[in-house]
Image: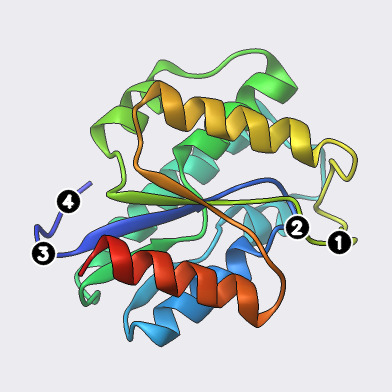
Amino acid sequence: MEKKNNIKRIALIGPESTAKSTLSEALAKYFNTTWVPEYARPYLSTINRKYTLDDIIAIAKHQLEEENNLLANSSKFIFADTELIISKVWCLDVFNTCPDWIEENIITFKYDFYLLTSPDLPWQEDPLRENPHRRTFFFNWYEDELRKINADYFIIKGSGDERLKNCIRVINLKFK
């Protein structure tokens, strides 16, 4: 992944149905920059079968490639609606294994800041979502992974506009 030195890479990470996509798009709009939508959604919507480990790998690689492509159009920040820690946890949870390159790239392409979204919002049903009763479990796992890499992160809570305002406030404080 290429890195423009002046662009701060901010990843949204958290369990399903915690507003990562909504926040990523809204933050990009607020800060007048780009965001990288989650590629898993369109990919999984078209395969018409149960996903495999190879599918997760293809999704993760495309996600990084798309972020790299959008970086050139970014201004001050780029917001990623997912990142490789989510891929790692997904691989381990479903297949009990994770490719080495995912582990290596989590460190190599560590984000400048992570927004860890709390599962304090009501579950929104969606055919691609799988874990309505395990959101706290995944939240704790993601936080543990962030601690392992000594990531700079902040937990985002609240609903509606409050959630977005919390993100904006912490980003503005972090990157004065």
For numbered disc 3, what is the local secondary structure? Answer: loop
- The residue under the point 46% across, 38% down is 84
**Which residue type does callout 1 highlight?**
Pro
Is 124 left, or right, of 79 in this rendering? Answer: right
What residue sits right under mark 4 in the picture?
A: 2
Q: Earlier in the sequence, mark 4 or mark 1?
A: 4
**Which residue type does callout 4 highlight?**
Glu
Q: Say the numbered circle drawn on residue 6.
A: 3
Q: Earlier in the sequence, mark 3 or mark 2?
A: 3
Question: Are the residues at dot 1 and dot 2 in contact (C-beta closer than 8 Å)?
Answer: yes
How busy is the neighbourhood of tag 3: few (under 14 within 10 Å), some, or many (20 plus)?
few
What residue sits right under mark 2 in the picture?
A: 17
Reply above or below: 11 against 101. Answer: below
- The residue under the point 80% across, 53% down is 128
Q: Say the numbered circle drawn on residue 163.
A: none
Question: Are the residues at dot 3 and dot 1 in contact (C-beta closer than 8 Å)?
Answer: no
**Which residue type does callout 3 highlight?**
Asn
How busy is the neighbourhood of tag 1: few (under 14 within 10 Å), some, or many (20 plus)?
few
